[in-house]
Image (cartoon, rainbow, N blue to C red):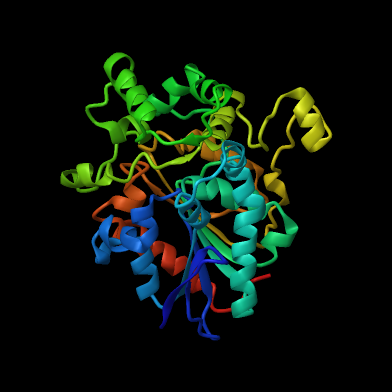
Amino acid sequence: MDLYWDFNACHLVLEFSEDKWALLFCLYMDFSWQVMRGSWIPQINPWALSLPIVVLMSGLVMCVGHAGVMAIYLYQRKISASFFQKFWDWSWQEYALYDLQEMIRYVYTVTNSRVFVIGYSQGTIISLAAFTEPDTVQMVGAAALLCPITYLNHMTARLPLRLVKMHLTQVLLAVGIHELNFKSDWGTRIMEMMCDRHVDCGDLLSSITGKNCCFNSSRIDFYLEYEPHPSSTKNLNHLFQMIRKGTFAKYDYGFWKNLKHYGQLKPPKFDLSQIPSSLPLWMGYGGNDALADVTDLQHTLKELQSKPDLLYLENYGHLDFLLSTRAKEDVYDKMLAFFDSLGTHSSY
């Protein structure tokens, strides 16, 4: 099976076999350049525990979606401030309505078969929003969602909640900071201030995601080489809007700009009831997840037409679904059994 980069399509492509499903693994976490080179696949977890490797070894043909390839190219050039601002003018909404749709279409066209999609964390927000679009969901054969999120009303992660109360993203946008990088000089100063005065950052990962049970704590320093990862300020502001407003909706520009963008005063909601009941869904969620709260998931399930297959792990936190030393047995094998049960043809 050949492996190569397709920079035009902005994702990793494997030579496809006609008798197998294609799978689009959409983490959508804006990994750094080191991660973009592919090192995250074997290094974040050992090969035997890494989700992309486990999926690949199961026999599914895999395509790793990523919307940040062009950013690496742009950083090598001098660009104007106005262009830089426009470049970072996106949120998960654009990922859902444009990037993911095109990635799915590319795989669908190459393989001539519907696509299995795996989303994790923000990737589930993007996936579920995309599935409300008929042109996208008709190309999808099934989806597995780890730590699924559409509503953030009951999110309890300490550091994000504090940043929301500070209106951090609104301040950054007002002063012209459009690339959100907490490892930059100003980002480091903000984190130091937060940890000194507002949040106990002795365990930084827990302050962001909540308590995690089962990953190798001796690798925390290594994980923090990649986290928090850069993104756009607008993207984080969109997530903070979800927390404040309790909605699963498009980006809120304010009344008058909403009129310009959407033709109405409030941003349109993503209607989960528009996801076809015939689309097979599998969801894995944890009792200790401070981002993808169980109560918010119940809200999501009530709005779906179908009843997804559910895997609940009471002691799992947000990171455990990717980094747990037991994730293969606890999560991935069950997820792959779900895909395997669907066979090689779409159920709708």
Residue most extreme to the top: 197
Q: Do we see residue 181 in this rendering?
A: yes
Residue most extreme to the right: 263
Q: Position of residue 14 (x, y in %)?
A: 46, 76
Q: Position of residue 301 (x, y in %)?
A: 59, 44
Tell me which corner region of the image, top left, top right, bottom left or bottom right, holds residue 159.
top left
Q: Is residue 293 left or right of residue 174?
A: left
Looking at this view, is 243 or 257 the one in front? 257
Q: Is residue 168 left or right of residue 306?
A: left
Where does the C terminus fall, quadrant-wise? bottom right
158 shown above or below 33? above
Where does the N terminus fall, quadrant-wise? bottom left
Q: Residue at x 60, y 28 (%)?
A: 246
Q: Residue at x 23, y 61 (%)?
A: 46
98 shown above or below 167? below
Q: Residue at x 70, y 57 (%)?
A: 276
Q: Position of residue 81 (x, y in %)?
A: 57, 36
Q: Do we see residue 199 in this rendering?
A: no
Looking at this view, is 291 or 187 the one in front? 187
Tell me which corner region of the image, top left, top right, bottom left or bottom right, holds residue 174.
top right
Looking at this view, is 15 or 336 the one in front? 15
Q: Position of residue 211 (x, y in %)?
A: 30, 35
